[in-house]
Amino acid sequence: MTNVPISTSTLELQKRPVVLWDLVLTLVLLLGGFVTAIVIGVGAVGLGFAPGESCSDCADAQIFFGVALAMFGPPVIYVLAIIIAVIRLIKRQIAFWVPIVGILGGVGLWATGAALVFTGIPGFTFG
């Protein structure tokens, strides 16, 4: 075996170039996701008023859990999406898809919470 010196040329130490379209698109989607998280988080507050005051046989625990999931789930998912997107941007990997997944996940959690609220109200119909 021979000893091979470790090469530290500048070409080997350079990082991947910044993909400008990905950076811009990721930042725009992160801003759009921020607005979406705020809107659906505030909209979740209204879910708490869905049963009304005269609902004596409602599933209160289910409604509470549904409102909490719809209110706090989307911001938590969105903060995770921000962290993952920033890490991917620092590593110079394609990151535009991360905010899209975060937005879809947040909307999905809100819809799940809303479904829990509405199924906790006996006899509730949309018509």
Image: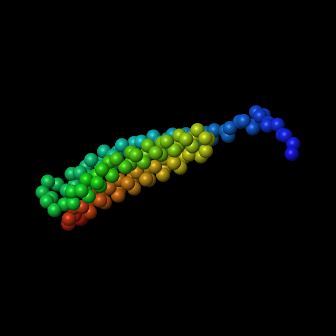
Task: Please tell me which residue lies in front, 13 or 28.
Answer: 13
**67 versus 21 height, above or below:** below
- Residue 125, visible in the rendered structure: yes
Image location of residue 114, percent across then percent down: 30, 56
Image location of residue 7, percent across then percent down: 79, 36
Image location of residue 20, percent across then percent down: 61, 39
Q: Tell me the residue at 62%/41% (across/down).
A: 92
Where on the picture, by quarter, is residue 62? Answer: bottom left
**54 versus 99 height, above or below:** below
Residue situated furthest right in the rendering: 2
Task: Please tell me which residue lies in front, 79 or 45.
Answer: 79
Image location of residue 116, percent across then percent down: 29, 59
Residue situated furthest bottom in the rendering: 123
The C terminus is located in which quarter? bottom left
Residue situated furthest front in the rendering: 1
Question: Left or right: 98 with respect to 54?
Answer: right
Task: Please tell me which residue lies in front, 39 or 56.
Answer: 56
Total labels drawn: 0
Q: Tell me the residue at 28%/54% (across/down).
A: 65
The N terminus is located in which quarter? top right
Q: Tell me the residue at 35%/56% (across/down).
A: 111
Q: Tell me the residue at 63%/38% (across/down).
A: 18
